[in-house]
Image (tube, rainbow, N blue to C red):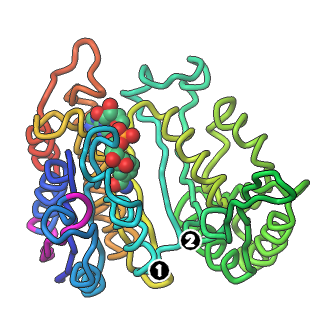
Amino acid sequence: MGFKIGCIPGDGIGPEIVREARKVLDAVGKKYGHEFEFTEIDMGGCSIDKYGVPLTDEAIEKAKASDAVLMGSIGGNTSTSPWYKLPPEKRPEAGLLKIRKSLGLFANLRPSYLYEELKDACPLRAEVAEAGFDMLIMRELTGGLYFGERYTKEVDGVMTAVDTLSYNENEIRRIAVKAFEIAGKRRKKVISIDKANVLDSSRLWRKVVNEVAENYPDIELEHMLVDNAAMQLVKNPAQFDVVLTENMFGDILSDEAAEISGSIGMLSSASLNETKFGLYEPSGGSAPDIAGKNIANPIATILSAAMMLRFTFDLDKEADAIENAVREVLKAGIRTGDIMSDGCRRVSTSEMGDEIVNRI
Ligand code: NAD
């Protein structure tokens, strides 16, 4: 079968890690008889340098014409790069917000998985790490506090800042449906996070999630307050399968879940809209400190490509092949610098890509 993939290498380590993911997709295509056709799209700092804006309308059209988009990362050193002297709407990150909005990407998925071979890198107590964990944070991406009305003004002589947290039932329902559907492909458990003891938006969240749950009788649902969730993530992460949450809670909890898994270079992510379309990218940034040195870990991007095969193209067998190849590479003691430990063999970005290709 043929699939059209929009490809955004971006800035920093972006081009290096995307190159390896494309290599792996080509190997999967060859083995399983698929054709992946790639169209390059400029976004971020590289687009500012060429066109003066982080994302052109033409780039958005190219993304919309694709079946899915695979991205590296965008942005530079926020203290030294001239991109950060521009007004906020012209900076690299504005491109990311614009593409998410233009493509209607409202559901952000971030898996956090502790590999047996990387348990030493887990900052949790040994017995907690020993139990392992395998969770998927499903974060609402286009509503809530980050998109509500905001202003700063003087009220009765006192400077006052206001941010508004608003959700309507449709926004909650569509992400809850995604969470239950994906839980059906996993261990069939959804833990929904809110602050229903205080916030109206959370009480509506809980009500709508309960309604959606009625259509999925085989999926177990539990509600958890966000402060408790922050504790449970470090105390007993094994209890989580799909974690469903609104935008700001998800922003914070997904970084906590990333940290306990040991390395940012291992964590994939996906942002989905109401159709099968998705934008797939590693959870980390453009890592300007190691860019251009061929030492970045490409595994997060390669695993993001596996998510693309699973969630957009419904190619589960092919996605399994990539995930198994990554596991075998780790078992063989092959490591990039960020996940290096005693007795392992250190490889470059491109060598890691080759090792994974060899195991497809
Ligand atoms: P970062 O994730 O780029 O880097 C944090 C640390 O993790 C660095 O030490 C880096 O070397 C390391 N790291 C990250 N990815 C790695 C990989 N694949 N292999 C090995 N080590 C890796 O975060 P930052 O330094 O806060 O941000 C740098 C730039 O990235 C900023 O401009 C920021 O805005 C941007 N950013 C972009 C995205 C995105 O494109 N979605 C996400 C986050 C940050």
Which label belongs to residue 104?
Answer: 1
Q: Residue at x 24, y 49 (%)?
A: 82
Q: Say which residue label 2 marks.
A: 142
Left/right placement of residue 57 relative to residue 105 reads left
Q: Residue at x 14, y 39 (%)?
A: 349
Residue 266 visible in image: no
Left/right placement of residue 101 relative to residue 284 reads right
**Residue in the foreground of this view, choosing between 107 and 331:** 107
> Is residue 10 inside the magenta stretch?
no
Q: Earlier in the sequence, mark 2 or mark 1?
A: 1
Q: Is residue 154 above or below residue 286?
A: below
Q: Position of residue 351 (x, y in %)?
A: 9, 38
Q: Residues within 10 Å of mark 1 (few under 14, many from 20)?
A: some
Magenta extent = 30-45
Residues marked 2 and 1 touching at CB (< 8 Å): yes
Left/right placement of residue 131 relative to residue 148 reads left
Left/right placement of residue 210 relative to residue 262 reads right
Amino acid residing under circle 1: Gly
Q: Residue at x 9, y 44 (%)?
A: 354
Q: Position of residue 59 (x, y in %)?
A: 23, 78
Q: Position of residue 218 (x, y in %)?
A: 70, 69
Residue 216 visible in image: yes
SS at mark 1?
Answer: loop
